[in-house]
Amino acid sequence: QKEVEQNSGPLSVPEGAIASLNCTYSDRGSQSFFWYRQYSGKSPELIMFIYSNGDKEDGRFTAQLNKASQYVSLLIRDSQPSDSATYLCAVNNAGGTSYGKLTFGQGTILTVHP
Amino acid sequence: GAVVSQHPSWVICKSGTSVKIECRSLDFQATTMFWYRQFPKQSLMLMATSNEGSKATYEQGVEKDKFLINHASLTLSTLTVTSAHPEDSSFYICSAESAGLEQFFGPGTRLTVL
């Protein structure tokens, strides 16, 4: 079983719709969870992170964490064609504000079509 | 956000030669730097973690004698791929972390070994 699993997609949504990206992880000791966006040929850029159970909103993005189910998701509201990219879920075991060593999922390809 | 640079951005070399990749944190001091490798259509795989002034910690399966890491200062880490072979062709990405701050990724270096 992979440590961090994502559906590779591709996930295709129409412009303006909500895109829902999911991620599960195997290590119950994981404490910090991150969502990165990666455009083709570029390095990842951080969208947001979440530490606590529940929802965390930042603009059009909402991260949801359920530690009991070992599940973290990312919702993108009002999806735009510019959101088309690969979305990477990453986890680590570092507590507090230390980001530390990240384990990445394989990424989900999102395509937003006009 | 903080800026991390990598040099070169791409390199083509002959099989058997060595290639050095530099990773610099431009506007902050990085206590820890990480080196990742990403093959086409795959996720980032952590190769090693380096702390300034100490030996790097390599992930399982990564040959430390082949991938030499030097973290000589708080703003510079280098990865040298020794005796490179075509199977080492990949996208190499570094990231830098300062205690209490997020992990910032460099733009990546695409290595092609002929």
Image (cartoon, coloured by chain):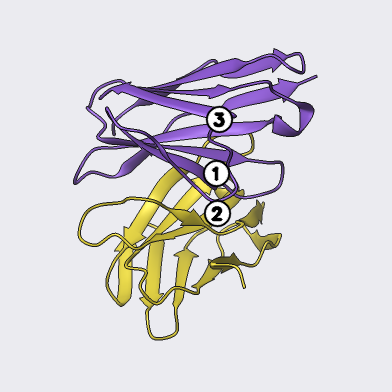
Nearer to the camera, A65 or B68: B68
Image quadrant for the C terminus of chain B? Answer: top right
Q: CA distance from mark 3 to mark 1?
A: 25 Å
Q: Which chain is disc 3 placed on?
A: B
Q: CA distance from mark 3 to mark 2?
A: 28 Å
Residue bearing the label numbered 3: B67
From the image, state the color of chain B.
purple
- Where disc 3 sits, the SS reads strand
Residue bearing the label numbered 2: A87
Marks 3 & 2, CB-CB < 8 Å contact: no
Q: Amino acid at mark 2?
A: Tyr
Q: Amino acid at mark 1?
A: Gln
Nearest to viewer (mark 3 / mark 1): 3
Residue bearing the label numbered 1: A38
The label on residue A75 is none
- Where disc 1 sits, the SS reads strand
Q: Which chain is disc 1 placed on?
A: A
Q: Is residue B108 visible?
A: no
- Where disc 2 sits, the SS reads strand
Colour yellow belongs to chain: A
Q: CA distance from mark 1 to mark 2?
A: 6 Å
Image quadrant for the N terminus of chain B? Answer: top left
Q: Residues within 10 Å of mark 2 (few under 14, many from 20)?
A: many
Residue B74 occupies which quadrant of the picture?
top left
Counting from the top left corner in percent of width and height, residue A96 is at: 20, 60
At a point 70% along the width and 31% down the height, the residue shown is B88
Nearer to the camera, B103 or A62: B103
Nearer to the camera, B95 or B80: B80
